[in-house]
Image: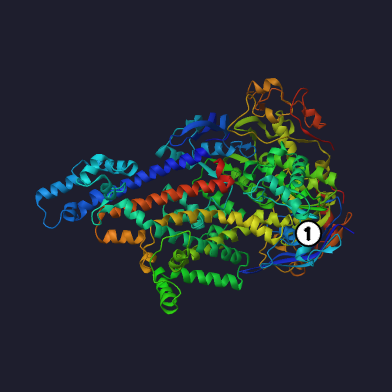
Amino acid sequence: MALLEVHDLHTSFSTDDGLVRAVEGVSFSVDHGRVLGIVGESGCGKSVSMLSIMRLLSMRQASTSGRVMFDGVDLLEASAAEMQNLRGREIAMIFQDPMTSLNPVYRIGWQVAEAARIHDATLSKAEANKRAEAMLTAVGIPSPRERLASYPHELSGGMRQRVMIAMALINNPKLLIADEPTTALDVTTQAQILELIRTLRTDLGSAVVFITHDLGVVAELCDEVVVMYAGKVVERGGVRDVFHAPQHPYTWGLLGSLPGRNLRSKRLFSIAGSPPSLLDPPTGCRFAMRCIHVMDRCRNDEPALVSAPGDEHFVACHLAPEIRNDAANQFPGGTA
Amino acid sequence: MLRYTIRRLLWGALVILGVSLSVFVLFGPVLRARSDLSPARLYAGKNPSAAEIVQVEKNLGLDKPVMQQYGDMMYRLVLGPSDAEKKRLCPNASEDRCRELVGRLGRSYAKQRSVDLLIWDRIGATASLTMVAGVIWMSVSIPVGIISAIRPRSWFDRTTVTGVLVAQSLPVYYFGLLALYFFTYKLHLFPQGGYVKFSFSNPWPWLWHLILPATTLSLTFMALYVRIVRGGMMDAMGEDYVRTARAKGASERRTVFRHAMRNALLPVVTIFGLDLGLLLGGAILTEATFGLQGLGQLSVSAASSLDVPLTSGVVLFAAILIVVANIVVDVAYAFIDPRIRLS
Amino acid sequence: MSSGETILRLEKLTKHFPVTRGIIFQREIATLKAVDDVSFEIKAGQTLGLVGESGCGKSTLARCIVRLLDPTSGRIEFEGEDISRLSGKALRSVRRDLVMIFQDPMSSLNPRMRVSEIIGEPLEVYRAGTSATRRARVMELLELVGLNSEHFNRFPHEFSGGQRQRIGIARALALSPKLIVCDEPVSALDVSVQAQIINLLEDLQAEFGLTYLFIAHDLDIVRRVSDEVHVMYLGRVVERGTDEDLYEAPHHPYSAALLSARPVPDPDRAQNRTHIVLEGDVPSPLDLPSGCRFRTRCPRAQPVCSEVEPELDGPAGIHEWACHYPLETWPLASPEDIRRPGSAVGVTEVGP
C-alpha cells in the first residue's frame, strides 16, 4: 500500500458570494521515497488539496470530504489530537513564502527546536538546540551555531527557506509536502533548494509531494505528476509519460506555452481565455470552453479518468485515444 | 540601540521646542492681539492707572522684545526661574515664598501660586485615575479581544462586537452619572467622589474612591482596545507563520498564545503608551463627573478664570507628557520587536 | 526612424543611492551601487533582453531610462539626443515616445478608474485629439490588445491578471510610442497567460515596428523575445550577445550558472544533465567584493579576480564577456569542468 492515498477529495468554501468548489474529486497516491509533483495554474486547487490533507483549513469556512489514508490512518477521520501528533512528526509541510512563514519575533534556533520539542516532551532545551544546529548544518546553512540566534529578517530568502526545510525535517517525517517552495526565490537560489530537496530525499527516504506551477521544476524533481485544472485532476502519470506523451489538451497547452521548449515555433501556443469561476463551474468538462478540440459531448458529460498509454497514466478527456496519441506524438521525445 | 534612543530623545527635544514655541505664540502675542485680555486688566485690579499698567507689564517682562520673552520662558522651563525674574515677579517675598509663587512653568496670578505646584497638587489624582483605568481596560480587553478573535462569529464574539459598539457610542459622563446613581446613591457601595491619597499601610480608601471613575474612564478605551486586540489577533491568526506553527504540530493553545498573541499585541503596546500619556494630561469629563481634583479640572478652571499662565502651563505640561510617552513607546517597541533594532 | 538605426544608446550609465546615517545631520556612510557603468544600444524595431536575479539593478536601470529616476552619471541618448538631464517640457515630450509597462498589473492600475479612463489618460494628458477621437482611439486600443468595447466602462478588479496586463499595454500604446521598456511584464502571470502576453507583444512589435527593452528574470522568456541579451550581476553587465551566442556558448561563469539553474521542462534532459549549483548568496550591493563582483561565488576565481575588475570584451561581434577566466566549452560534461584548479570556491557536484 502506498504511503499516502487520496480518494475523491472534495473541498469547498462558503463565501458571501456562494459556495466555491475549490477541489472536486481529486485522487492520487505517493509511495515511500517517491516525489509526486502537482502542477496547475493559480486557483486550480493544488494548494487547497494539500491544506485539506493536513487539515490546516479553517473548519468554519471550508468543508472537506473524501478519504485520505496516510500510513493506515484516515486523516479526515482522525481526531484533532491525532492530527496534531502527526503534523510536524510524520507529515511536514513547507510553504511558498519563506519571508512570511517564519515568526518574525522568535529566533531561528527557537523555531527550529520548537518543532522537535512539541513532539518530544522529554527533550531538554539544550538537546533540542543541538538537534536544531545539526539540522541547520544538514540543510547547508553556514555557521549554524551563530544562525540559531538570528531572527528571520536577518536572513536572505534562500536561507529562510532552508530554515523552513530544517524545521520540517527535524523529526524525520515520512512525508514532506512542499507548497511552491521555490516560487518566491531567484533561479540560482531555486537551484540550490531543489538540489537540497533531491539530496534529502535520497538521504532520508521521505516521500515528497511537490506543488508548483512550473513544469520545469516538475521535470527536474518529480517521479510522478498530477495535472490539475479548475479543481480537478485532468491527467496523472509518470513524469516521462506526461511530458513525452501528454494526453490532455490542457497539458498540451501548458507544455506548448513554455518558451524554453518551443524555441523554433513561430508563435507560442497559448490557451485562450482564463479558467472558469469555481462559484459556478460549467457542467461537463471544465476545460471545454478553452479547448480547441471541444465536442458537443464535452459540454454535457463530465469525462472520467481513463487509462492512457504508459504505466499508471490516466487522463480525463472525451477525445478518442487515437486523436490524443497523434497529438502526443508531436511533443519532443514522444514515445506513445 | 543606544544610537536609536539618542535620536528619539533629540527628536523629542526638538518637538518640545516646537510645542513650547506655539504655546508661547498662542498664549502670548496672539492672545493679546486678538482679545482684550491685556495682562494689566487681569492683574492690575479694576481701573488701573497708566503707570500701574506699565509697572505690571514690566513685572511680567512684557516690555522686552518678543524673542527675549520666549528666551526667558525657555530658560525658566529648563533651568528654573532666574534671579532677575524672581526679583521682577515676587519683589517683596522671601526666597521660600518666592519658590511657591514662581516655578518653571510660571506663576498663576489668579491662584497666587506657582504653576508647578498647582500641577503637582493635582497630578496624584490624575495619575491614579489613569493607572487604575489602564489596568482595568487592559485586563478586560486583551482576553476578550483574543477570545473573540479565535472564535469569530460565535455568540461571545457577537456579544463583544455589540458591547463595543454600545460602549463607544455612550458618552463618558452618561455612563458616569448612571454609575453614580446606582452604585452610590441607590446601593451605597462607593463614595460620592473625591480623591484620597495613596498609602501603603491602607491602599483601600484610595482604590475605593477610584473604582467608579476609573471604570467609567476605562469603558471607552476598553471598547477601542477590544477592537484593536480582536483585529490584530484575527490578522495574526491568518498569517503564514501561524499556519507554519500548526503544520509543526503545535497545539491550538500554543499557536494562539506563543505565535499569534505576541505579534498581535505589539501594536497595542504603542497605542497604550500614547493613551496613557494623553490621559495623564487630565481626563476632564471623568474628573468633573466624579469631583476628582485632577489636572483636567485644573485646566478647566484655569481657562474659565482667564488664568493665562496656568492654562499655558498645563497645556505645555500635557504636551511634554505626550512627547515623553512617544519616546518611551518607541524605545520599548524597539526592545520587543526585533525587526526595529536594525533599521 | 527607420528600422536598424540606433534608437537608444546608454553610455556608462550609473545610478548610486547614497545610504545615510546620523542623529540629526545625515552623513553618507555608504553607496548602494545599483547600476554601475552600463553601456549598450538598441536598434529600432529590435528587442534587447536584460536578465538577472533580484537586486541586480535591472529595474533601477529601466527606471533611469524612462527617467522615473535621475541617473547619477552617464548618458542616455534617445534618438540621438541626451535625455539624461532633461526636465519639464522637454522630458514630457520624450515621454510620449518612451513608455514603460510594469510587472504587477494590479498595483499599476488605479483601482478607482475605469478602463476607458486608464487607457485614455495619456491622450488626455497630452491633449491628443478631441474627446470623440480619444474615445475612438481607446476603442481601437482595446481591440488591439485583445479586449473589446464591452470592457470600456469596467474597473481593473473585474479583470484577470492577463487582461489587466493587456490594459497596461493598451495604456502604453495610447500615444504610439517608439520604445517600450517592459519591466518583468509576465512574471506575475500563469504560464498559459504568459504565452498570450508574449504573443501579443510580438504581434504589436511586428505591426508597429516597436522597439522593446525587455527585462525579466526568466531566461527562456528573454531568449524567446530578444534579438540581443545582456546578463546583469550586481549592477553590471557581465555578458552580452545574440540569443544564440549567449545560450549556446556562454563564456561568463555566472551566465553558465544561470543557464544551468534554469529548470528544463523535459524529464530526460533535466534529470540527466550537469547541474552547476552556485554556493552562497549574492553579496550586498552596499559592500561589493573587490575586483570582479562575481568572484565570491565563482568556481573559477583566481587571485587576480580580487584585484582587477574585468571589462566587457570579446574577440569579435557583439558577444562580449567580463571575465578573466571565461569558459571555453559548453555544455559542460561534468560540473568539475567549470572549476579551475586553485579556486577556493566550490560548486555542489551533481552528476547524472
* Residue A21 in the image: above or below residue C333: below
Instruction: State which quarter of the image contains the N terminus of chain A.
Output: bottom right
Q: SS class of the residue under badge 1?
A: helix
Q: Indicate left or right for C127 with A40 as reference.
A: left
Give the residue at mark 1: A85
Q: How is the image coloured?
A: rainbow
* Residue B210 in the image: above or below residue B245: below
Q: Nearer the viewer, residue C20 or C52?
A: C20
**Chain of the residue under label 1:** A
Q: Residue at point 56% right, 40% down?
A: B342
Q: Indicate left or right for A133 with C4 as reference.
A: right
Q: Is residue C163 visible?
A: no
Task: Provide residue C74's location: percent of width, then percent of height.
Answer: 51, 28
Task: Provide residue C142's location: percent of width, then percent of height.
Answer: 55, 54
> Disc 1 residue type?
Asn
Task: Provide residue C272's location: percent of width, then percent of height.
Answer: 84, 39
* Residue B138 in the image: above or below residue C65: below
